[in-house]
Amino acid sequence: MTSPAGSARTQWDCARSSPSEVWGRDVRILVVEDNSRMGEVLKRGLGEDGYAVDLATSRGEAEDLLSRNDYDSVLLDLILQQREDGLDLLKALRDDSVWLPVLVLTARDSVEDRVRGLDLGADDYLVKPFAFPELTARLRALVRRSPEPRPAELQVGDLRLDPASRRVRRGLIPISLTTKEFSLLEYLMRHAGQVLARARILEHVWDLAYDRDFNVLEVYVRYLREKIDRPFGRRSIETVRGVGYRLVDDGARANPL
């Protein structure tokens, strides 16, 4: 078994090694920064650490580079040329199902800015000024991630749920849910197509006071069906007898009002 000291030493060695040595290939980063001085500092510093770095100063340049090259991560400033907002680029990437890790790097330090950036699909958020070792540590963590879909809005068929605005709609029709109904639907949608045991759902949606109280779960599943399924002629919440529930795309049997 590896000792704690050995583990720490391995992590330190990885931190000191170049990205190509750690991952066995070149690691390419796109820096989107309109301040030429800051952009060059980032490009030079990351280059010295072994990253292959491209620099864009506007949304247009960034989109052009992204269309022509494969990147492992993006460092994105929020204030770009001609008063462009970096969050617009971030939203466009996620809307186009581009899931490469994005680290927002900006002087905007308000809670509202951070929350908005994360809700739009940013993977991390670092406020300027920053320590360069912290930036590279966060970058290593992002590059280790696989670019799996992490949509800001959940969708199963024509059923959509926005965790940030807490809105739900079936097609173009909004659906009003209580707080607990919303939490239950969000959990089911995040695991769409999977059979979820009743105990697992209770553990994640309710607190320990409801442990094994399956009656409560059954009541709320019925509430959800009355709102997201029955008015639209759907059966998207399936009961898996003896186990729990599964949310599926029931569009094939759709008969919307």
Image (tube, rainbow, N blue to C red):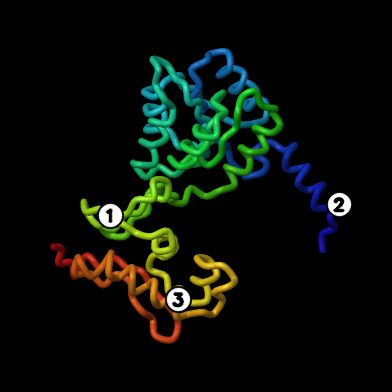
Helix, strand or loop status at disc 1? strand
- Sequence-wise, the earlier of marks 3 and 2 is 2
Give the residue displayed 67% in from the left and 38% down from the top.
137
Q: Residue furthest bottom?
A: 242
Q: Nearer the viewer, residue 19 or 88?
A: 88
Give the label, 1 or 3, closer to the camera: 3
Mark 3 = which residue? 216
Task: Note whether 190 is above or below 91 in the view shown.
Answer: below
Is residue 184 shown to the viewer in this render?
yes
The residue indicated by pointer 1 is 169
Residue 20 quadrant: top right
Q: Earlier in the sequence, mark 2 or mark 1?
A: 2
| x, y percent for residue 131 | 70, 27
Left or right: where does residue 49 sit relative to residue 167?
A: right
Tell me the kind of residue under disc 2: Ala
Give the mark toward the camera: 3 or 2: 3
Q: Pointers 3 and 2 in contact (CB under 8 A)? A: no
Gap in angstroms between the C-alphas marked 2 and 1: 52 Å
Where residue 4 appears, as percent x and y from the top left, is 84, 55
Callout 3 secondary element: helix
Kind of residue sitting beneath label 3 = Val
- Which residue carries the number 2 mark? 5
Name which residue type carries label 1. Answer: Arg
> In this rendering, is residue 176 above or below 9?
below
135 left or right of 1 in image: left
- Callout 1: 10 Å neighbours few (<14), some, many (20+)? some
Secondary structure at badge 2 equals helix
Task: Please give the name of the residue rendered at 59% of the width and 71% of the height, measured from the top-left corner.
Answer: 208
Q: Taking 243 as reference, is 174 above or below it?
A: above
Dot 1 or dot 3, earlier in sequence: 1
